[in-house]
Structure formats: structure tokens, C-alpha cells
Image: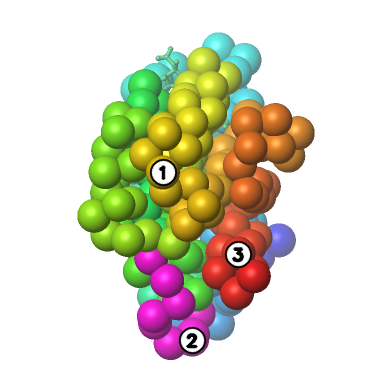
């Protein structure tokens, strides 16, 4: 692996926000592909953080500073990750479900959606179920995108789908779900229209849903 990518991963793990941003720019200037920098630099670093967090080798404060460094790096990559598709593909209301504060994956998915020409309304984290429904109605959204990182908040996705049915919008709004603990089987069991494992495939799937 290139030295700059290894350095991005190492600095992210140390939570060195400014260094991560600087190194991401350096990697871009060296001609590396933004997707490669994201995967082999930033996400590689986050993987190590995730494993150490799980093993109780590091704790919430260290994870938080790494998350901030991840954000700083992705901001640098954002313009380069965006595709060249024209805008106007459709409207997506996106958020992390109620009770869940994880937003790194959601933000990456949003970047990819925007790169494919979708207009995205980002509701943020810990989004009440009614907020998804109300915004989808007000904005006449084509897709609701739900992210959940906790096994305890995954069931909230089912509540959003149920609320969409009750509000009478289920036939005109597609619902996509994702997040580390979410599986295809789970998505099918709650009646979601689509599940994807990562951000690039989420954007591809959204295009498919819109054109179907
Ligand atoms: Co949290 N956390 N966390 N955490 N955290 C996990 C999720 C955990 C797996 C760590 C562990 O124990 N191994 C664990 C959950 C266990 C479980 O549920 N079974 C956990 C826990 C327990 C907790 C707390 C309860 C810890 C505590 O307080 N004791 C707490 C909960 C707070 C809450 O939400 N109410 C908590 C808090 C935090 C921080 C605030 C410190 C921080 C979040 C900061 C932030 O997001 N701004 C944090 C982090 C960073 C993590 C880990 C380490 C990394 C998550 C991440 O950002 N990954 C995580 C460990 C792990 O996942 N391995 C962990 C990188 C990101 C790019 O991936 O979000 O999966 P991800 O997104 C991917 C795909 O999943 C997909 O695309 C993305 C990009 O490819 N995707 C979609 C995501 N959404 C999608 C939507 C789609 C399609 C694809 O369609 C709409």
C-alpha cells in the first residue's frame, strides 16, 4: 500500500484531524483515486478503531476523535468522490433512525447519492420516525434512506416502514436501509425495498429504484 494511505490510516487512528485532512489532500495531489483513499486510507483506519473498540482496547472518547478525523478526511475527498452525473435524478430523505447517533456511514452514503445526481435532505441522527414521514410527504420524496448501526435501533426501521404504510405513502416512496448490523434478510423481513452493504452500491441501487 502507498505510504500516504498508511499514514492516513495511522493518523485517523490517533484522531489527528488536521493531519488526516492534509494527507488526504496530498494523496489527491499525488493522483490517487478518491475512492481508493477512502477505502484504503480512511475506512481502513476506522476498521482498526472498530476492532479495538470491540476488544475494549479503546473507549468512546478515542472513537469520537477518530470519527472527527474521518469526517475531516471525507470533507476533503467529497468533491472528488462526487460523480459527473447531472442533478435532478430524484429526492431522497435520509437519516439515522431514532436512538442512534452514528453518522459516518450515513454521511458517506449521502455523498454518493449526491454524486449520482440526487437531491438529499439530510435529517441527521436520532431522527424520530414521524420526522421521516412528515418530510417525505412535504418534500414529495422518491426515496427514504435509513441508517442504523446498533442492533437495538435496527427494529426502528420496521417502524418507519409501518408508519409510511399508515400515512398512505408506501406505494409512492421507496425505502432503502443499511448500516453495519443490517442484512439483506433483515431488510426483506421488514419489507424494505432495498438493502445495500456500502455507500457506492447504495447510490447504484437508488438509481435502479428510480428508473424501475
Ligand atoms: Co458505536 N458502536 N456506539 N460509536 N461504533 C458500533 C456500531 C459497535 C459495533 C462497536 C462494537 O462494539 N464493536 C457497537 C454496536 C454493537 C451492537 O449494536 N451490537 C457500538 C456501540 C455499542 C456504541 C455505544 C452504545 C457505546 C457506548 O456508549 N457504550 C454508543 C451508542 C450511541 C448511540 O448511537 N446511541 C456508541 C457511540 C459511538 C460514537 C459516538 C463514539 C461513534 C460514532 C461517531 C459518529 O458516527 N459521528 C461510534 C463509532 C465510530 C463506532 C464504530 C467504531 C464505527 C462506526 C463507523 O462509523 N464505521 C462501530 C464499530 C463498527 O461498525 N465496526 C461502532 C464506518 C462507517 C463508514 O461504516 O456506518 O457501517 P458504517 O456505514 C457503511 C455501511 O454500513 C453502509 O455504507 C457505509 C459506507 O460504506 N451504510 C448504508 C450505512 N448506512 C447505510 C444506509 C444505506 C445503505 C448503506 O441505505 C440507506
Q: How far across and down, in percent of the image, does residue 190 sit? A: 63, 31
* Residue 168 numbered mark, or none: 1
Boundaries of the magenta span: 83-91
User: How dense is the environment of label 2, judged by Cα within 10 Å: few (below 14), some, or many (20 and up)?
Assistant: few
Does residue 194 appear anywhere in the picture? yes
Does residue 7 appear anywhere in the picture? no
Q: Are marks 3 and 2 in contact (CB under 8 Å)?
A: no
Q: Are marks 2 and 1 in contact (CB under 8 Å)?
A: no
Q: Residue at x 30, y 52 (%)?
A: 137
Q: Earlier in the sequence, mark 2 or mark 1?
A: 2
User: How dense is the environment of label 3, judged by Cα within 10 Å: few (below 14), some, or many (20 and up)?
Assistant: some
Q: Nearer the viewer, mark 2 or mark 1?
A: 1
Structural distance between the alpha carbons of marks 2 and 1: 35 Å
Which residue appears farthest toward the top when viewing the image? 56
* Residue 209 numbered mark, or none: 3
Q: Residue at x 55, y 12 (%)?
A: 56
Q: Nearer the viewer, mark 3 or mark 2?
A: 3
Q: How far across and down, in percent of the image, does residue 166 sit? A: 42, 34
> Is residue 188 rendered to the left or right of residue 147?
right
Structural distance between the alpha carbons of marks 3 and 2: 20 Å
* Residue 84 numbered mark, or none: 2
Relative to 174, say whether 15 is above or below.
above
Q: Is residue 22 magenta?
A: no
- Taking depth in this image into account, of 163 and 181 the one nearest to the observer is 163
Task: Give the secondary structure at mark 3.
Answer: helix
Amino acid at each position: 500500500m502507498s505510504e500516504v494511505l498508511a499514514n492516513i490510516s495511522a493518523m485517523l487512528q490517533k484522531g489527528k484531524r488536521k493531519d488526516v485532512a492534509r494527507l488526504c489532500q496530498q494523496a489527491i495531489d499525488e493522483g490517487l483515486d478518491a475512492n481508493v483513499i477512502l477505502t484504503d486510507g480512511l475506512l481502513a483506519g476506522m476498521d482498526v478503531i472498530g476492532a479495538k473498540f470491540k476488544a475494549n482496547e479503546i473507549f468512546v472518547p478515542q472513537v469520537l476523535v477518530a470519527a472527527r478525523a474521518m469526517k475531516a478526511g471525507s470533507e476533503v475527498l467529497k468533491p472528488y468522490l462526487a460523480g459527473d452525473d447531472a442533478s435532478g435524478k430524484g429526492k431522497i430523505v435520509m437519516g439515522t433512525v431514532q436512538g442512534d447517533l452514528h453518522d459516518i456511514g450515513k454521511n458517506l452514503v449521502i455523498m454518493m447519492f449526491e454524486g449520482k445526481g440526487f437531491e438529499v435532505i439530510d435529517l441527521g441522527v436520532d431522527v424520530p420516525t414521524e420526522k421521516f414521514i412528515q418530510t417525505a410527504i412535504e418534500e414529495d420524496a422518491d426515496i427514504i434512506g435509513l441508517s442504523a448501526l446498533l442492533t437495538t435501533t435496527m427494529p426502528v426501521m420496521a417502524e418507519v416502514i409501518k408508519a409510511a404504510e399508515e400515512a398512505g405513502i408506501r406505494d409512492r416512496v421507496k425505502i432503502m436501509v443499511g448500516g453495519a448490523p443490517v442484512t439483506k434478510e433483515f431488510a426483506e423481513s421488514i419489507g424494505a425495498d432495498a438493502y445495500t452493504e456500502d455507500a457506492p452500491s447504495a447510490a447504484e441501487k437508488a438509481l435502479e429504484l428510480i428508473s424501475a
